[in-house]
Image: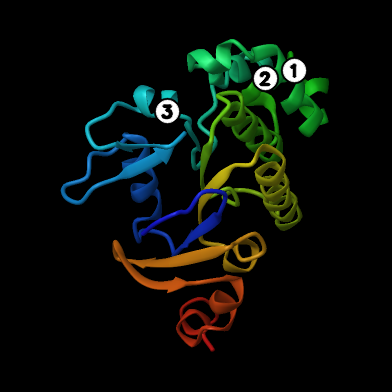
Amino acid sequence: MDVNDGETVVLLGSNGNGKSTLIKCITGLVEPSSGEVTAEINGMTTNLIGKTPEEIVDLGIAMVPEGRRLFPALTVEENLTLGAYRPEARAKIDENMKFVFETFPRLEERRKQLAGSMSGGEQQMVAVARALMSDPKILLVDEPSVGLAPILVSQMIAKIKELKEIKNLTVLMAEQNFNQAIKIADRGYIIVHGQIEFEGENAAALENNDMIKQYYLGV
């Protein structure tokens, strides 16, 4: 599987098939039993195997985890500040904070509110904004639709697309909601029982593939 510079690639599959595990392998949270994970950033190719999550963040790779994984007893602003971990991001913390508040005005209104007291949709905004505070080049998004109402899912997917274009990000998104995922996909993969079973060269190839229709839609 590969994700090219500037692409939005979606990793599709139902629960339990390995989407989140693959994302965690890329970010150093799970050590792969075999294979390799490499990233090319600023013209340099780096082997990610064996690197700690902190080292991977330092390279410019950020993750929006499934279930948000916020610090509920900290405020919105404190959660965002923790996202500015890498040295480059710490130097731009005011600039990046201004950007995420412009992107998510609700968060600026509630910057002093405890993250644990916010709604699911608001918490997802915090999770995305926290990842952006690290000033990443590559954004990994794990199941952004989980726990959100359908209208909020559509809004969040649209916001990820907007952010990708504004910040010139490379995006890999793991998602089980097929109809939402293909709205922003340049390409996509289907993962079944930990194996890549299909690669769609573009959104149309994903949408019109008979295997995918049967797998997701039962037709």
Amino acid type assigned to the residue bearing label 3 in the image = Leu
Whether residue 104 can be seen here: no
- Amino acid identity at mark 1: Arg
Say which quadrant the N terminus sits in.
Answer: bottom left
Within 10 Å of disc 2 (Cα), the crowding (few <14, some 14-19, many 20+) is: many
Q: Is residue 187 above or below residue 39?
A: below
Which structural element holds mark 1?
loop
> Residues under labels 2 and 3: Cα distance?
25 Å
Query: How crowded is the residue under tag 1: few (<14 C-alpha within 10 Å), some, or many (20+)?
Result: some
Considering the numbered disc 3 on the image, is that residue within a helix, a strand or a loop? Answer: loop
Residue type of the residue flagged with mark 2: Val
User: Is there a contact, CB below 8 Å, between mark 2 and mark 1?
Assistant: yes
Q: Are marks 2 and 3 in contact (CB under 8 Å)?
A: no
Residue picked out by circle 2: 76
Q: Earlier in the sequence, mark 1 or mark 3?
A: 3
Which label is found at residue 55? none
Residue 111 disc label:
1
Count every numbered label the image shows and give the total.
Answer: 3
Between label 2 and label 3, give the one nearer the viewer.
Answer: 3
Q: What residue is drawn where x is 70% and y is 47%?
A: 156
Can residue 60 be seen by looking at this rendering? Answer: yes
Q: Position of residue 141 (x, y in %)?
A: 53, 45
**Image vertical order of residue 78 relative to residue 198, above or below:** above
